[in-house]
Image (cartoon, helix red, strand yellow):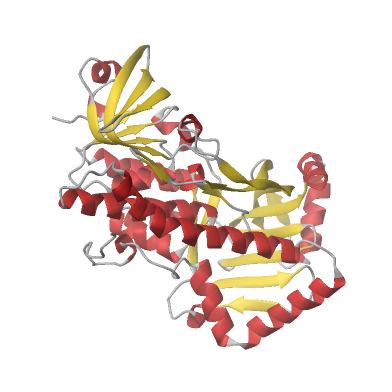
Amino acid sequence: MVLTQAAQSPQAIASRSVDYDVTIVGGGIVGLTLACSLKDSGLRIALMEARPKEAGFANRRAYAITLLSGRIFQRLGIWDEVLPQITTFQQIRLAEELHPEVVNLQPDDLGTPDLGYVAEHGVLLRALHRRLEQCSTVDWLCPATVQSVRYESQQATLTVALGDTVRQVTSRLVIAADGARSPIRQQAGIQTHGWKYWQSCITVVLRPEQSHQNIAREHFWASGPFATLPLPGNRCQIVLTAPHRQAQHWLEAPEAEFIAELQRRYQGQLGKLDMVSERQLFPVQLMYSDRYVQSRLALVGDAAHCCHPVGGQGMNLGIRDAAALAQVLTQAQQRGQDIGSLKILRRYERWRRLETLAILMFTDVLDRLFSNNWWWLRRLRRLGLWGMNRIWLVRHLSLRLMTGLSGRLPDLAQPGLKSTVDCS
């Protein structure tokens, strides 16, 4: 019988022999999405997280959630709980600095009722936790720290610190969902490539005097993109991208000076602005792994790739990874195949690697195209916005990319469809 953490302490788990089909290292949104996606696969799953389970519930950072990610959450059964706590937006507004040419993307451009959602980290995490509490095939090993992993022909053996004890846990497959600095990826010797940008991002939550009207905004400044994500309660999370020194200045500037800069950028459209959170700063990088898989190991989310935040694709790429890998593993299990073999895992890598790399390059080009003052590029991008405003096909294709509806969709993103797509 498999017991969840609610009924069993780490010490009790450590006192018995532990053996799993899948061990997911990392209990963030991507790791939990993967575990939920595998709940009906017949696989026995261990979910390891270094921090206490509730540690992420207070995280108020918000993410743009694509239509594809929303469909996945619907199929996982968490949408009814999540939907009242998030914002649905029906308009995306694009502009260059204070230039009068504004592109308004609408649902009619895509043929869908909505264009996306904005959700806070803690809201998604709590809903995924509750869903997994109903799943008898998932063991929470938390807080647990993986000290080392030994990969063998038929299994991987993880040395895990669980509370005051150290145990060896065997698993047919290890999945690294442990972030951009993934210790699992580094221990496996998988190299990464990419670069750190000359920019950093500042995030803060505001409450404007005027209604945000559920509009998602992306204004392109020479210093970097300036995004506004609408939140419930007429709050907005902004993501201000700027060169490192300038970003550090805005992080430390008096609140009145910072608010004045935001007012200048909004041109007073949102009225008086009140800060309702502390400012936070994080660096920006593009990173991709040499490979996503090796025998007995697969990488998902930030452990496999990171991109510039322009366009809000990062979290959504990880959610898509989780759904794709779950589909590959479920089909392999149904066919009696070895889920940890390199042959099976390469199906996932072939599916996701090129698609993800295309998004990484798209966000990189977009940032470089707009984050400069070269006169000829300024004219080119204004021409591009002018064309997008007037050519439906350009708006349609752009929205398919932004909303995750381009490329190969996992079955979880197709409501009511059972897993029938051959991943081989």
In percent of width and height, residue 62 lies at: 54, 50
* 238 left or right, relative to 20: right
* Of residues 274 and 302, the one drawn nearer to the viewer in this rendering: 302
At horizontal 36% and vertical 43% (from top left) the residue drawn is 32
Q: In the picture, residue 70 is in which quadrant?
A: bottom left
Residue 256 against residue 392 in the figure, above or below = above
* 271 left or right, relative to 374: left
At horizontal 82% and vertical 47% (from top left) the residue drawn is 246
In percent of width and height, residue 33 lies at: 36, 48
In percent of width and height, residue 15 lies at: 23, 14
Q: Please, which residue is most extreme toward the left here? A: 1
* 8 left or right, relative to 364: left
Q: In the picture, residue 358 is in which quadrant?
A: bottom right
| Quadrant holding the C terminus | bottom left
Residue 156 against residue 362 in the figure, above or below = above
* 354 left or right, relative to 230: left
At horizontal 26% and vertical 38% (from top left) the residue drawn is 133
| Quadrant holding the N terminus | top left
Residue 252 against residue 226 in the figure, above or below = above
Residue 50 against residue 135 in the figure, above or below = above
Q: In the picture, residue 147 is in which quadrant?
A: top left
